[in-house]
Amino acid sequence: MSLWYLPGLPLLGALACGLLYLFSLPRRSGGAHGHAEHAHGSGATDHGHADGHGDDHGHGAHAVAPGASNPLFGIFAIGPIACALALAIAFTTRLIGLADGQRVIESAPWHWFDAGSYQIVVSLLLDPLSSTLVLVITGVGSLIFLYALGYMAHDEGRVKFFAYLNLFVAAMLTLVLSSNLLGLFVGWEGVGLCSYLLIGFWHRKGWPAEAGQKAFVVNRIGDACFVLGSFLLLRLFGTLDLSDIGAAVVSVRERPGAAFELALAALLLFGGCCGKSAQFPLFTWLPDAMAGPTPVSALIHAATMVTAGVYLVARLAPLFAASPAVLNVIGVVGALTALIGASTGLVQRDIKRVLAYSTVSQLGYMFIALGCGAFTAAVFHLVTHAFFKALLFLGAGSVIHGMHEEQDMHRMGGLRGPMPRTFVTFLCGAAALSGLPLLSGFFSKDEILAHAWAHGGIGVLTWLIGLAAAAMTAFYTWRMVALTFFGNARYDERAHPAHESPFTMTLPLMVLAVLAVLGGLLGLPPVITHALHVPHVLGDWLAPVFAPALALLHPGGPPPHLSAPIEWALLGLGALVALLFAHAGFHAYANGPELDGRLSAARPAATGFLGEAWKVDASYVRRVVQPIQRLAHLIATACDLGAIDGAVNGAGTLFTRVARASRAWVDGSLKSYSLWVGAGAALLALWWMFV
Amino acid sequence: MSNYLQSLPSIAPEIAMTVLLCAVLVVDLLLKGRDSRKVGYLTLGGLGVVAWLLLGQWGELGSAGAAKRVFGMIDIDRFSTFFKLFTVGSLAAVVLFVLLDRRERRHGIGEYYLLLLGAGLGIFFMVSTSNLLLLMLGLELLSLASYSLAGFHKGDKRSAEAAMKYVVFGGLSAGVMLYGISLLYGITGTIDLTEMASGPHSLAAQFSSGPVPVAVAIVLVLAGFAYKVSVVPFHFWTPDVYEGAPTPVTSFLAVASKAAGFAALLRFVGKLFLVDGADGAVQQYGARIGALLAILSALTMTLGNLAALRQSSMKRMLAYSSIAHAGYVLMGMATMESSGWNAAMFYLAAYYLMNLGAFGFVLYFESVTGSDDIASLKGLGAKALWVTVPMVVFLVSLTGLPPTVGFTGKYMLFVAGVDNGLLWLSLVMALNSVVSLFYYFRIVKALFLAEPAERSMPGQSALAGSIFVLAVLTVLFGLYIAPLQAWCDASVESLRLGAG
Amino acid sequence: MNVPHAHLLALAAVLFGLGCLGFLLRRNAIIVLASIELMLNAANLAFLTGSRMHSSAAQPSLEGPIFALFVILIAAAEAAVGLALVIALYRLKRTAELDSSSELRG
């Protein structure tokens, strides 16, 4: 079996779903479409039917959802990713069977193209790092696909939805499996495109389309950095093969002047990561991306795509390890992002926006870890975060589903009664996110903070910020739990009673809850592993991958472990902060959201500042978007002369023309073609002669 | 005389093209405008023959030293064959567009094919000569046919206006260019580029003794080329003409005519400034023109992209986008190195695929909605997926995202730029491709992310089929580019070696 | 008659400049086309001068005069197409003034 099957299967699934959709479209836009139109209109805000979910799969839905009535649809939708999961498990088993340090499976190479004298050869490569990611993508992905089958059961475009979703998985698997930076970039752009289409999936609401556009454009800024970084690498290394680059870092760094270029390349690549992984200052697209359907938020904007930046840094760990300054930048950016995200989460009312800012902040943690050179810790947090954040998003989706598309937590309350299964699983996720002791989030976050502390220097600063963000995380998580599931119902219980979601939706929740609770076993802290004589599973698994980078980072042998007392103290401090602020958050809001009103009345400026994520977005609009728009306007009206009239009409003498033209230039409506051409030619000639 | 007869097979494609042109003229007269579709099929068939001849020629030119000059002025090398094939391909696509466009049938279209073939013949001569007289004649043949084509819809004010602007500014550029050529002739005493570069009165020698006349002459000629390929600040006619001309003609102007302009420009710059083994004066001279091209490139891509941001007409937007793409190609040229020129050639080929497809899409929707306004596309995405999905592919490619030919092309340009000390220009290009995303994806947004429209889509399966094929090629050459790249490299190689 | 080359070239430059000015300043389409003719004829004069400069009795440089002949041809063809389009535009708009064409802009 070739590795190409892994991304190939979902790609086939996407094609199958796409063709199914294409061939089941109504031929003529007649009555059938009028019907669809109607379903759209209401589907926008209320895509489900009010009640009777389990048995309402019936005729209404079939008539308006092209392709969904086909018995093959279920197979096309879920089959590919389930097969990919099975394949991933099989490959990983084979990988485990190989000797330690030789755990690499590589596919047949594909000679893509030559750029100048360089050859771009792409193959797929499975090593412990990519297999971890592949398992997360296919595993969590399968659960989310299953959930989406229930969640989207009444959506008219669900066949199209699964086509996009399958395409996304194919692109994501290409991203993590590619052995070449440019192949990785193919997946990188592919997931971006799918994310764009899926965020805008419910475009009938209007703003999701804008949100999709924004996500795409903001990401393009990062991508431009990525591409430039890749040129630099190509120039420095003569190849874009990821393992070759990793191996050649040491020798390249010896060349005179190369250290700066290496750092620049690393910094540019990190710019790309800032876009994709929503780091400061490019994080503003992620909260808006919540306009997409909730399974999309869970899969793309929490569990997989947004962690691509973390993966990239981990994959090119030697490159980053060779430039400690860049690592410091990464750590500081991560800490800043963690702080902005967590503090903004404190005052959000929309349950999905709380989770979005929480994701931003948790990604910040991963970059803190990368900044300290703790690559394993970053991957560990990536994995546990995929578990509990997917769980929380899916739980939120279940709540939104049960509340008939209500997302405002101020209008929820008391949902633990009507939605017991969602409630219990959501509690597990919340506990893990807030880092309550012994859950997955506790261990992974603690590992990051311990590394930051041990890193010293700037690491202590990031440790401090990380701790503060952890406190805020605990607070807003339990505020969310309290507002959603406790207190009195703040909605019209009689008109729209809340209801539990169907089994296809709660089953993935339960599986993810188990993973969120037990995921910490993958990476117990050293004090515990020593005491119990158990391995740090993930650490041992990934150790060969990161060994070269760590050797580069610590040329004098690995740094000493923290002493046991300090480690216990850090563990205890983390647990204490989490428990304390979780308690505070819960109690402040257990009886309702009144505190929010009091706070915004008392400190309107501060809450406004937090509510808009430190006003980063607004400053973009003012400083970047508006100037570009003005420039485009100027060029479109002033330089685009549009018509000969202004050009050739002469109006008497050249001199009045010039006078008028210079005046018109000021009021932005110059229309002189020929003068421009003449001036251009004259300038060129002058330049040629005298410069 | 026998020498001339022996040379005739070398210009078999040109002869075939001329015969085809005459045949179309006669058949159209015989049919008396009754069933012009037959003329279209005849044209397509004839173009097939020409393409076959060209492919044969391409194969023959594979062996070393096969490139030659016939009749003292026509260079038969892979470079010209590449562009001739390119031209035949786009002519075939445009003929298909005309055949398949339901609206074009109203305008007795026999002459349409005649004019297209005439323009094609002009391109054939223009791309395969280093003799400035023949180059100018080819260019004029192309231009005269293009003026008439732009004004083909006689009753349409916009079409007439577009043609008027085109002819006026085309005439200006021809005048400027001819004056420049006359100065070059006065300076060097020859109208052959090869002799100009090497003879006793070589341009470089003249330049070191008196730079001003040489500079004036070169800039005047370059202005003529810059006009043809719409380089800022000689681009002003482009949006007006592209918008006003009938859409098949627009696609011809945007693709074949622009590529021909680039071919002539490449040959002009290549012969005069890329001479192997040249002395220091020529080197410095070449570096200077490289810098000039780099500045023009930066200006062109930036202004083109920024002006495209605010357009509501798709044709006008694509016009500005084509200006921006001319800037990208210029960047490859500005490196003055074969890797950059290879990339520029490749990008031209990529440009050909994606722009033909995009204009085919415009044509398809124009015939449905009667307008090329982006707003009129709203919600039509799901109605004709066979066309709209390819359009997404073209736009992705135009933006320069993988896995399309636009991405590989842009990547090669980037690498060439970074490798040859044009890092600043690569940065400008990277920023530009971010900006271009805004306006390209406005079309995607209108198509897919808007309330579905209540409009029936009459099937135009043949047109949709050809658009689909172009989309497949756009992706295919993005993933499997070795053959295309080999062709481009071989073409540039033959240009640098020159002809016997 | 022995007119210096410099004088001929200066005359060509003046003709060319006059053509450019006419193009810039006049708005009647026919006069604009005539200005272009003037520019082409400036080129012709320069071609013939160039030929005189580079000719010797043994080896006349014929490329210039031949080029000039073809330029005359080009000029005629341009004028034919240009005037046809002026007429087409005149039929639609009842004017040959170029600044009346302003459907396309932006």
Image (cartoon, rainbow, N blue to C red):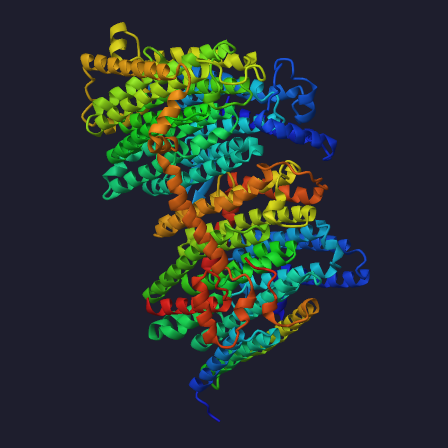
* Closer to the camera in the image, C38 or B37: C38
Residue A530 visible in the snapshot: yes
> Taking the image as drawn, is residue A98 in sight?
no
Residue A233 in percent (x, y) is at 34, 40
Left or right side of A257 for A542: right
- Point out the image quarter for the N terminus of chain B: bottom right
Looking at the image, residue B3 lies above or below residue A137: below
> What's the residue at 36%, 28% (across, down)?
A601
Outermost residue, top direction?
A532
Q: How many marks?
A: 0
Residue A284 % position (x, y): 41, 35
Q: Nearer the viewer, residue B358 or C65?
A: B358
x and y, in percent, of residue B15 in the image: 66, 62
Compared across the picture, whether A347 is left or right of A172 comes to left
Q: Locate residue A21 relative to residue B271 in the image: left or right.
A: right
Query: Which residue: 43% across, 34% down?
Result: A285
Relative to A478, say whether B278 is above or below.
below
Q: Using the image, determine if residue B480 lies above or below residue B326.
A: above
x, y percentage for residue A103? 37, 20
The image quarter in which residue A157 lies:
top right
Is A432 situated above or below A20? above
Q: Can you name the residue that lies furthest to the bottom here? A: C1
